[in-house]
Image: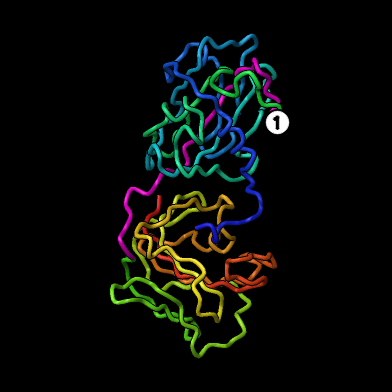
Amino acid sequence: MSRLRRFTALTAAAALVLVTAACGSDDENGVESAALSDVEVTGEVGQKPDVTVPEDFALEETVGTEHTEGDGVPLVAGKPALIHITMVNVRTGDVAISTYDQEQPLYLQAFDEANLFKTIVETMEGAASGSRYVFGMQPGDLYGEQGNTQFGIEPDDDVIAVVDAISGPPEEVLDGPDGEAVDPPADTPTVVEDGDGQVTGIDFSGLPKAAPEEFQVITLIEGEGPEARDDSVVSFNYLGQVWGREQVFDESYSRGEPTPFGLGVSGLIRAWDEGLVGTKRGSRVMIIAPPEMAYGDQERPGSGIPPNSTLVFVIDVLGVS
């Protein structure tokens, strides 16, 4: 999957710093606190919350509670998840960091203690997408004695964390595309399959050597499942080639399991982040990505992708959360 990912820094990189530095704790957490109920949290899930901390507020322990109940797919331990997190320094009353300021959720390849604070994982495991949780976090369950100067959090600072569950992993993942075949335009490259129906390549025979200049998303099979959003976790199989070349530079069909990834989090090339939004589960699409929608003029040694390449992908969308 690495060849499909962007090589520029993710806009959520700062958020990754805040979660991977967690110390963890062996204390029992997740118990509601009368002190935590004094913290006012307003705003809709999916929007940056307003958090008001009373003067002289003090935590006796790290605690967490559900603020708003959602009804979407649940977060599953060890599986991909999309969340928004806003952290407020109790000492200053200021927002230390919010992924809402980056205008995209934080994608976790696995919802676990390696990627997120232990208290949050334990409390929110199984939480439905659309839920909001509020946590009062003491230093020992945050960054310990070192604090986090990047976010203005000193070693003794308590923090209020508001976490919105945006999307968990797809609950249903198909074995292959399932829907109605669509006749593509006459100048569309041909998908090559083996005897088992697995995609093995893309054939450019009879097509111009010069690659198309426009970005195209061509539906080959129209599925009937839910549509992918720009904050969905999507499971898919894929294959990619440079326009006009026989070599496959990357594919997932031979790996057996579809690849899950978050849309709209700048973890994939722009052609995928934009082109797959609105695609229904069960669909097969072909994406033709000119350089500005792929890797531009970047050197990619060993990838088989020269600078300024137009890339062509076949993508089976098999799960959508």
Q: Which residues are magenta?
A: 150-176
Q: Position of residue 188 (x, y in %)?
A: 48, 81
Q: Position of residue 319 (x, y in %)?
A: 37, 55
Query: Can you identify the residue that label 1 sits on?
Result: 150
The correct choice, above or below, for 306 with respect to 47 in the image is: below
Residue lying at 31% horizontally and 66% vertically, measured from the top left: 178
Say which amino acid is labelled 1.
Answer: Gln
Q: Position of residue 145 (x, y in %)?
A: 63, 18
Between 113 and 312, the residue placed more toward the observer is: 113
Magenta stretch: includes residue 171: yes
Residue lying at 44% horizontally and 35% vertically, measured from the top left: 112
The correct choice, above or below, for 139 with respect to 8 in the image is: above
Identify the image quadrant of residue 293.
bottom right
Residue lying at 48% horizontally and 11% vertically, measured from the top left: 34
Question: Left or right: 269 with respect to 200?
Answer: right
State how many labels appear: 1
Residue at the extreme bottom: 206
Magenta stretch: includes residue 73: no
